Amino acid sequence: MKAALLATAAVFLAPISPVHAQAGAADDQATAGGIADIIVTAQRRSENLQKAAIAVSAVTGDTLVQQSITQANDLTRVVPALQVAPAASFTQIYLRGVGTFGANAFAEQGVAFNLDGVYLSRPAAPAGLFYDLERVEVLKGPQGTLYGRNATGGAVNVIAAKPKLGETSGYINAEYGNYDAIKGSAALNLPLGDKVALRVAGQYVKRDGYYSDGYDDEDTQAVRAQLRGETGTGLDATLSVDYAHVGGMGSGGTIMPLLNGKKRLGPSDPRVIAAYIARAPTRPVPQAVASDDGYQDNGFFGAALTVNADLGFATLTVVPAYRKTELDFRSYASSFLIDIQEMSSQMSLETRLASRSGPLEWVVGGYYFAEDVSARQFFDQASNGTRLNSQLDTESLATFGQATLSLTDRFRVTGGLRYTTDTKRQATEAHTLPFVGFVNPAQGNFTPIILDIVSNPRTDVDFNKLTWKAGVEFDVGPRSLLYASAATGFKSGALFAATGRNYSAPENMRAYTVGSKNRFFDNKVQLNAEAFYWKYKDQQISHLGPVQVASTPGGPIFGPVFTTENAGKSTIYGLELEALFQPSANAQFSANIQYLHTTYDELIYQAYSTTGTAPVIGCAVTPTALTGASPAARIFNVNCSGRPLVNAPKWVFNLGYEHGFQLGDHGRITAAMDTRIETSRYLSLDFLDLGRQGSYMMSNARLTYETPSGNFSLTGFINNIENELVFANSLQSPAKPGVIYNQLRPPRTYGVRAGFRF
């Protein structure tokens, strides 16, 4: 299959690389009316996106503003390969089906998230960052050489706008929309002499919730300050400090099937509570009833220093960084209470030495990362509960190198290696709280009996991995690149709270890519294509599963804990096509199409049933003889081999058109519209129809007036014109088999936005 796919891709992509490209045009200069270039740093050096021999999509900061994107969850709208969803205060990122259902302090992403080159480890870390940005880069496929740990599926790089020397400038954006949405962002760039500049930016977002009970609101305040200086002798440094607070009620969810048509009934809505209580098991078994007292009070602080020194033969880059995250939230989005307080701090240091441009271009470096997490977590389903008080520590060291050698002026080869060693430790006090019956039901005393099974999991484990990359690239024409690569990536083993083996092994990815990047017709047409084939081994899945919580003479006792285990291996392959057509300076068509085929070659795990009934899962289920923490509890084997990966739609189409109308001395009007068409996908490992998002189309439109000077603009916009109800996430109630709660993407939103630049 791999050979057939890549051979077909080579035949398909070769004609795309045009030998008739405009040979007389300069490589990087856009002709009048042509498509503008985007500079990226995906390979740890600045280069034209069209000349980067890597599968990467870039979204400019202006596009993010135009699309009203203020949080990571919104990125799904602009990058077909991405599916980003909320999970309480956490963010789950999936790229072509590769990701992690992270919902507690033990979780780590399968897609690395970076801010200005600094890896952010916590699943909640992407909050409060999406303002005053230069661009967002999405790297597709394992990035094991230059990015290292936890970049199995790829990486998302957020790059903030940098201070500009010798320039006084800034902007203010203000937006108002339905749901009483108020969004504001501003930036000020000030020169402090000839060689120093300061840039301060901020964001304010507040709106009502999308659900009937007020959940899924937004309440964010953020500020970022950057100080940049240079000596004029090849030394420059940028100090960045940022802080964000995320408040409000937090994310919501609703019971399935949907009640009352398309109306978004929240978890504490009386109609949802009544439907939940009516599902088995019913009273007098204790019931988890959602309340409207959910909240999030989360703070994020970061500081980083980037120093570049020109050594003549190479540039030395040193990036020390520190981040602190304080989470305090209560959520009922999945039908039951999740109450978490988490404090984490991470320190990292990356040092790189990169050569000058020439026949041999190389980068070598070292990386150090240390993180401490202190978490108090309570998951209460009334008839079952788990309380975890954990101290988690991670330390990681890596050394890496990558080089590209020009064998001719048109043909280059690339090779890279990275060796990583991770040490992970945990000290947890775990309480398993099963409901085991009533005090005296025969006498009418239905007071529930809840046990408290205490265990103290301890872990101290090392994970070591060598990852590599090999590639070739060929300039078919001045603006046409053909490339191929093979690369590996890994995600470090994950810990969980169990008294027996309480960690998973690392997961591994090997990816093969053939791609082509092209510009035609005086820079007016851009056509990029990529074929990919990925083999995913020792795949980590996160789910509510049985773990050993106690030992007895009769054998081990198992309780339900959100665990991560190596349960699968899978095959992923497909094609992605990006096209731009800009016939004039006033018009641009865009199309981004992805075909994705995914299959779990093997997916076998165990499920815990608190009621003893077989779990409701769309896969083969067989009972085991293992003992649960309550008399009724049972443990089952589950085999979902042959199923597709979750959050992996077979087809995604992103289509757009933008047209400008010049008004002479009166300014300019720009009309734009885009749409996303997506085929069906499963949202969870339960593989149930209620946890499946069907095919849909979601469209957005905007109309902007801009003054002749470009200093002022006024935009009217509407997103999700169809008011399509789209599911973002899904979770089955641990206490009530077959009861599904889904989280929803935003409904139709509209408003006006004013911008002023100086």
Image (spheres, grey):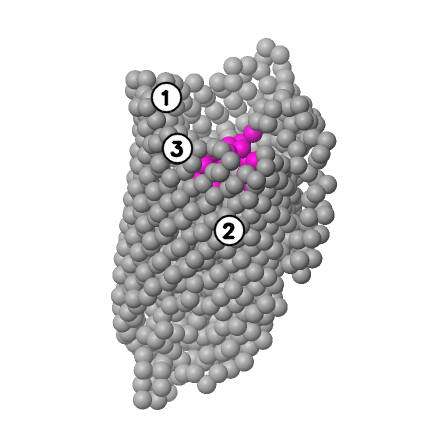
What type is the residue that disc 1 sits on? Leu
Q: Position of residue 581 (x, y in %)?
A: 67, 31
How many residues crowd around disc 2 within 10 Å: few (fewer than 14), some, or many (20 or more)?
Answer: many
Q: From the viewer's perspective, is residue 568 above or below residue 269?
A: below
Q: Is 195 rendered above or below residue 358?
A: above
Tell me if residue 663 can be seen: yes
Tell me the mark number nearer the camera, choosing from 1 and 2. Answer: 2
Q: Disc 3 and disc 2: Cα gap in Å?
A: 25 Å
Q: Report the residue at 32% width, 28% height from top.
A: 235
Furthest-top residue in view?
665
Q: Is residue 658 visible?
A: no
Q: Earlier in the sequence, mark 1 or mark 2?
A: 1
Q: x%, y% of residue 183?
A: 44, 34
Residue 585 sits in quarter: top right
Callout 3: SS = loop
Q: Is residue 501 magenta?
A: no
Q: CA distance from mark 1 to mark 2?
A: 37 Å
Disc 1 and disc 3 in contact, CB within 8 angstroms: no
- Disc 2 element: strand
Label located before the other in sequence (3 or 2): 3
Tag of residue 469:
2
User: Where is mark 1, residue-wise?
Assistant: 165
Mark 1 vs 2: CB contact within 8 A: no
Task: Give the residue drawn at x 72%, y 48%.
Answer: 11
View extreme (front): residue: 407
Q: From which residue to which does the magenta span run?
A: 37-53
Q: Residue at x 34, y 72 (%)?
A: 498
For mark 1, give the secondary structure.
Answer: loop
Pointer 3: what residue? 313
| Residue type pointed to by label 2 | Lys
